[in-house]
Image: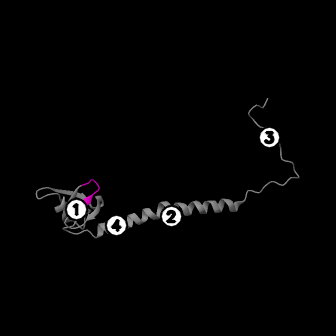
C-alpha cells in the first residue's frame, strides 16, 4: 500500500543517465562568490577604510560626534594610546576611544546647538 510514497524503479542498463555537470556547480559557486564580494565584503571594507582615515585625521579642536551621541570638542589626543579627551562643556571632559568617534562635525556646530 503506497498511498504517499512513489515506487522507485531500478535504472535499466541500456538507458543513458543525465550527467551531473560539474561546470554548472563551478559557475554557481563563482556567481555566489561575486555576489558576496560586491554586496557584502566590498562595501564593508570601504566603510572600514573611511573610518580609519577619519581616525588618523583627528586633531585638537575638532568638533566630533561619538557613537553614543555625545557632541564635543577634542581637547587632548594621545598618539601612543587610542584615547581622546573630549570637552562637552567648559567644566566637563570625557575620555573615549578613538574608534568610538563616528563623525567630525563642521566648525561652529557646538555654538549652534
Q: Quadrant of the N terminus?
A: top right
Query: Percent x, y for residue 77?
Result: 21, 66
Disc 1 or disc 2, which is closer to the eye? 2
In what element is the residue under mark 3? loop
Front in this rendered view, residue 71 or 81: 71
Cα distance between the residues tagged 1 and 2? 35 Å
- Residue at the (25%, 68%) spot, across then down: 58
Q: Give the mark, 3 or 4, whose residue is nearer the N terminus.
A: 3
Front in this rendered view, residue 13 or 90: 90
Q: Mark 4 highlights which residue?
A: 52
Q: Is residue 25 above or below residue 79?
A: above
In what element is the residue under mark 4? helix
Disc 4 or disc 2, which is closer to the eye? 2
Q: Give the mark, 4 or 1, whose residue is nearer the N terminus.
A: 4
Q: Give the mark, 1 or 3, whose residue is nearer the N terminus.
A: 3
Query: Percent x, y for residue 101?
Result: 28, 60
Cα distance between the residues tagged 3 and 4? 61 Å
Q: Quadrant of the C terminus?
A: bottom left
Front in this rendered view, residue 57 or 71: 71
Would residue 38 appear left or right of 69 to someone viewing this image?
A: right
Query: Percent x, y for residue 79?
Result: 24, 68
Query: Percent x, y for residue 56?
Result: 29, 69
- Image quadrant in which you'd find residue 59: bottom left
Cα distance between the residues tagged 4 and 2? 21 Å
Amino acid at each position: 500500500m503506497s498511498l504517499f510514497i512513489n515506487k522507485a524503479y531500478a535504472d535499466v542498463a541500456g538507458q543513458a543517465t543525465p550527467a551531473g555537470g560539474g561546470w554548472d556547480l563551478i559557475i554557481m559557486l563563482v556567481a555566489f562568490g561575486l555576489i558576496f564580494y560586491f554586496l557584502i565584503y566590498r562595501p564593508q571594507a570601504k566603510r572600514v577604510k573611511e573610518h580609519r582615515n577619519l581616525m588618523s585625521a583627528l586633531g585638537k579642536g575638532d568638533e566630533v560626534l561619538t557613537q553614543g551621541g555625545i557632541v564635543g570638542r577634542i581637547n587632548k589626543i594621545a598618539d601612543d594610546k587610542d584615547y581622546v579627551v573630549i570637552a562637552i562643556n567648559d567644566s566637563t571632559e570625557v575620555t573615549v576611544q578613538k574608534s568610538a568617534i563616528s563623525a567630525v562635525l563642521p566648525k561652529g556646530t557646538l555654538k549652534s546647538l
